[in-house]
Amino acid sequence: MEYAESREYVAGDDARHIDWRVTARTGRAHTKLFQAERERLSLIVADTSPALFFGTRTRYKSVQAARAGAVAAWLAQRQGDRIAALRGTASEAPIAPRSGQRGVLPVLDALARWYAQPPSGDAGLDVALDHAARLLRPGARLTVLADPRSASKISATRWSGLALHHEVVVIVLVDPLELSPPARALSFDVRGERIALDLGSQAARARWQAEFVAPLQQLATLLQSRGVRLHRLSTDDASDAWLSGSTLMRGA
């Protein structure tokens, strides 16, 4: 096979293809890619922040994230892409890019593990995107599964840089309660502790709106201006609803 390029080594790559010259020059292990391996990379980035492990209707946001990620993985497989996945941590290597079913199944396994319960060593979405930058090559597809607050913390410059070279899809997971809370007192169980929240007053609902709804609309405006597609996927939506465009958010 004809040599095409080198990229940073990922656990699971064939050690026989390590590019020793680039490794020596950069100080980081790199592997050679050959012409047959130049299919488009479809990378799934999983936000595993604690805010995702919450839900009041149908399923937790974390479960919906895993299901939406599985849809993205199978879509990539059908389109002939090489599939990879990662989260923001220094303790676990990314799922190495592979094509076909051999690429999908490890990604599904990882999503199930990451979203079954809050994983240890979560370093945030920003760190996950740092890891992603080492894997991505121009023309790749990047699918980001995130809580709205995590996505809102990423700078406009970073989103612009990603969208300049890649197809970027961001799926933010929301719960109906976050978007439209009832005008009454609510009670939540948070790590075994009972928390009471009174949303009966207009002022309380305005504060809730400022905390959950307004930042989401601001994020939509920002990402649209940067060429990034943003989907708002609720816990009671079909997990593949984002494919039809029905969950697409547009900026104000």
Image (spheres, rainbow, N blue to C red):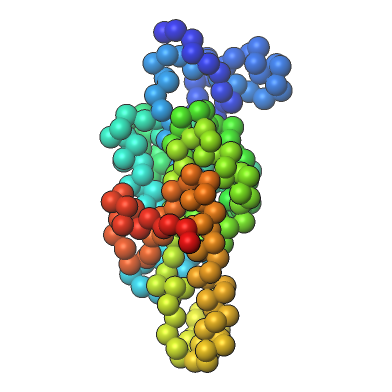
Measured as percent of width and height from the top left, residue 242 is found at 34, 53
Query: Which quadrant holds residue 177?
Result: bottom left
Q: Which residue is drawn at 41% across and 41% down?
A: 107
**How many numbered discs?**
0
Measured as percent of width and height from the top left, residue 201 is found at 52, 92
Measured as percent of width and height from the top left, residue 166 is found at 48, 35
Visible residue check, residue 234: yes
Visible residue check, residue 50: no
In depth, the one of 227 and 42 nearer the eye is 227
Residue lying at the far top of the rendered structure: 2
Query: Which quadrant holds residue 31?
Result: top right
In the rendered image, the vertical position of residue 32 relative to residue 114, given as above or below = above
Q: In this view, does 44 lie to the left or right of 100?
A: right
In the rendered image, the vertical position of residue 145 relative to residue 29, given as above or below = below
In depth, the one of 252 and 63 nearer the eye is 252
Residue lying at the far front of the rendered structure: 252
In depth, the one of 237 and 13 nearer the eye is 237
Q: Residue at x 61, y 49 (%)?
A: 156
Measured as percent of width and height from the top left, residue 55 is found at 43, 70
In the rendered image, the vertical position of residue 247 relative to residue 4, given as above or below = below
In depth, the one of 63 and 15 nearer the eye is 63
Q: Residue at x 53, y 36 (%)?
A: 164
In the rendered image, the vertical position of residue 119 relative to residue 70, given as above or below = below
